[in-house]
Image (cartoon, rainbow, N blue to C red):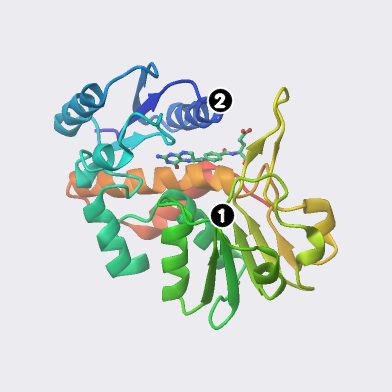
Amino acid sequence: MRPGLAIIQVGNNPSSLTYVRKKIALCEENEVHHELHHFPESITQQEIVHQIRTLNQQGSIDGILVQLPLPPHLSRLEISNEIKPSKDVDCLHMANFQNLLQNGEDNDIIPCTPAAVLHILDTQEIDVRNQNVTVIGRSQLVGFPLSVLLLRRNAKVTICHSETTVQEHVEKADIVISCAGHKELVKGQWIKNGAKVIDVGITRIPGTNKIVGDIEFQKALSKVSFITPVPGGVGPLTVSMLFKNLYRVWCRSNGLKLNIDEQDEELDYAQNYQF
Ligand SMILES: Nc1nc(=O)c2c([nH]1)NC[C@@H]1CN(c3ccc(C(=O)N[C@@H](CCC(=O)O)C(=O)O)cc3)C=[N+]21
């Protein structure tokens, strides 16, 4: 049986519309069974919970993804914990999240964006051990788990957030990973010569189709020894990692042994990425 992915989307957040469209396009390209459950902003907590419970029972669905952010009247925590842990491709359920903290990269599921960042570090052969790594942002899906995973790789991690100054921590960083979603928050001149920079942030410029990252890219270019662009950097890889996670849960639910080499091939055909 083909892998099956259910996406739950609430409202019409323009970024979510784009991301969901990309995920569905990849499902179609790769013959992954998919269902989009798109609800109006007015949906109640109970209705969403009911939908998740139905999908939890559904044999054709291996992975359930609740597209974030949710509107403020819905409880993300409660909704996350309704997802059957074995179908949770984003590692949102608290049991999965706890396992992630305990097992680090040995965990079954690593959330898609942190997994994308680790993949970049690995393919670029960037060793974070004993390096000053400044992570900007502490969200449950990105900054926080990523920081823990970097710590387990023995990086010296500094986490910045809305109540910290950023400049001084960027200035001392060997590696900067920005996941704030604030247009050009990190000034090129702050970056240490030779530093490596991964830009996870995406901000849409209103009234255009343009997106920009958290880093002043052009100004950073003369300083860095490596930088990922926006668009065309972490974003597309994030979607590849979703498919990697889906493949994992599908293997598990079908009693198949995971073949990691095969899995990496799956990843290559899912996206072409080149920095
Ligand atoms: N439950 C959940 N899981 C997620 O994995 C999740 C989420 N919620 N909410 C939002 C973020 C963001 N995210 C991206 C997906 C694709 C691109 C992507 O393809 N970006 C392209 C272009 C995008 C564009 O043109 O707008 C690029 O950066 O080149 C970016 C970001 C997944 N997220």
Is residue 260 toward the left or the right of residue 18 in the image?
left
- Percent x, y for residue 225? 76, 68
Query: Is the CB of the residue bearing disc 1 within 8 angstroms of ligand 1?
Result: no
Mark 2 neighbour class, 10 Å CA radius: few under 14, some 14 to 19, many 20 or more: few
Sequence-first tag of 2 and 1? 2
The N terminus, quarter of image: top left
Residue to which mark 1 is pinned: 162
Q: Residue at x 44, y 35 (%)?
A: 69
| Residue 41: quarter of image | top left
Residue 146 marker? none
For the residue pair 24 and 212, the one nearer the viewer reads as 212
Q: Which residue, as the protein is rendered here, is positioned at the far left? A: 57
For the residue pair 273 and 20, the one nearer the viewer reads as 20
Q: Amino acid at mark 2?
A: Pro
Vertical placement of residue 13 versus 274, above or below: above
Residue to which mark 2 is pinned: 14
Q: Residue at x 28, y 41 (%)?
A: 80
- Percent x, y for residue 183? 69, 44
Vertical placement of residue 42 versus 218, above or below: above
Q: Amino acid at mark 1?
A: Ser
Q: Residue at x 45, y 74 (%)?
A: 151
For the residue pair 265 and 116, the one nearer the viewer reads as 116
Is residue 128 toward the left or the right of residue 233 in the image?
left
Q: CA distance from mark 2 to mark 1?
A: 24 Å
- Percent x, y for residue 114? 47, 56
